[in-house]
Amino acid sequence: MAQEDLRLLCRDGVSLAARRWRPRGSGFWPVLLMRQPYGRAIASTVTYAHPAWYAAQGYQVVVVDVRGRGESGGHFRGFAQEASDGADCVRWARHLDHANGRVGTYGFSYQGLTQVLSDGSVPQDFPDALAPAHCGLDERCHWASEGGAHWWALGLGWALQLAAQGCARRSDGEGWLEIRRSLETGTFLQEGVNLLERHDPLGMGLTWLGREPAISAGWTCHQAPLELLRRPMLLIGGWYDPHLRGVLDLWRRSQAAGGDPWLRIGAWSHLNWHGGLDALQLAFFDRHLKASEVSMSPPGPLPPPLLLERLGDGAWRSPDPAAPSADAWWLRSQGLAAVRVDEGQLIPGVSTEGPADGAGACTLTLVHDPWRPLPGRGGHLGLDAGPVDRADLDARSDVACFSTPPLAEPLELFGQPELCIDVAADQASYDLCGALSVVAADGMGVRQWSTGVLRCRNNLSGLPQPRILLFQPVLLALRPGERLRLSLGASSWPQIGVNSGDPDVAPGPVTHRHRVITLQFRLPGARLRLRSLASEGLD
């Protein structure tokens, strides 16, 4: 395996740094291209095999420092710069020495989005095959916020990582150390905005925090060229990754453009892929970049285009993503669901009508005290992303729990859970934070599988207003004897900022100006149902 550093010249004269790994010898091989802002030596080895491994399988692997990062020239402007640089990099890679003229792209997160941003005008400007993971096109819904609330811990953490690397590029050791200490101690949750204002005032992270997440005005939603969306595509998502909805959006867009994308979703978080997906990715690129130029017949049997790992039992399934679900669960309580963990009920039914009688339906009151905000744990927005036990959280008196009876037979949930409920509040703003869990048959564990958040503005009329709380999509198996549980609270700190209740105090760390918020849930008509993954508007 040979390794060397290269440079390429963009159309505006900016020089980008690249590193290449390739097999030794005088052959010709496809190029696998990755573009990232974290330094080409890292090569996303936090999730992927080292480029040397791919080179040993018969590829040239090229990792490029994006503009303004690592040893590349120019100024870093985030996603805005990647469409023009993307086309330039693909054209350059096609004509590298020892290249066979075919280019594939791979990478996750920032490196995922760089693959689908291009201002190319001819087929040669686009990769022949691409494998974007954990990314999306909409900066508001797929990168910065959910349910009208900014990602707090995740957003600040990522923005500060980029800011620290900017400090290192400027040789600002003190700034780098200040940010590093804040991240290590957790104080970034309180001081992160101030650190960004000092060290990266023009960065994407701080810019996003300054925009209203409840509306699309002022936000950028990137457009992927139709020609690119039709190319062979392997889309990788995780049930515990915050960008999953972006991956599903790309999947739907590719299909609408006439593409036939592969989709793989596993029980993965942003960084933990449980052993990696390199074998799958290699098979994908072998099929599309190493096919015989004479017959163009891809090697090996065709794998299923859609394959999802089922939570609960780890089985890999190919369910119909467009299949509608008529299942629904109706919320009932005598008013003690926030006091007794076993009092609230989820009554199975169908999505169009509730139980025949309204017995047990009432108005349930819940109080949010900002002095002890309900913690957010695990899920897709947590720094501790993944499934967790939340029995202690459900035992709090500021959490309302609704559970089904023990299941008499197995149950599979597939889609995006949606809660429709009428809520009244005594403050101008409040949050709804939900979790879906499975209660063990012996009652000794409560395993959380999906979460959702919604920031609400209140008209203070005193009348309940209809709310729709969307959860992270899920494919979940429940066994006989287990129970499905819905938990509702008014905080998920530090996954989102604590709502102050006061429109003059921005959500964030708790201050002396945060108010107690009293919520009233009107249970008649309140229901939980599943939306299909093929539906538009999963954000």
Image: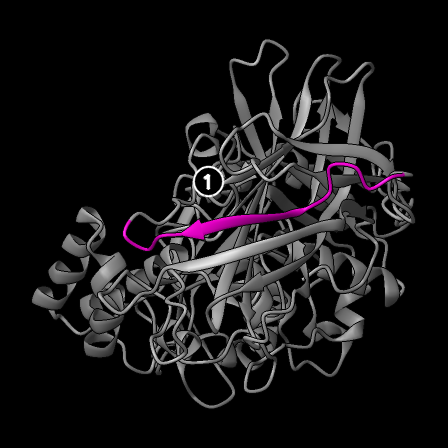
Residue 14: image location, x then y, percent: 40, 84
Single out the residue that lies furthest toward the top: 442
Residue 348 visible, this angle = yes
- Residue at 80%, 24% in the rendered image: 411
Q: Amino acid at mark 1?
A: Ala
Q: Which residues are magenta?
A: 357-371
Q: Is 78 located above or below residue 420 in the figure?
A: below
Tell me how many marks there are. 1
Q: Which residue is label 1 attached to? A: 385
Residue 334: image location, x then y, percent: 64, 36
Q: Is 521 located above or below residue 15 in the figure?
A: above
Quick one: SS at disc 1?
Answer: loop
In the image shown, does 402 or 388 lie closer to the viewer?
Answer: 402
Query: Going by the image, does 404 lie left or right of 134?
Result: right
In the image shown, does 513 or 281 lie closer to the viewer?
Answer: 513
Q: Quadrant location of residue 314? A: top right
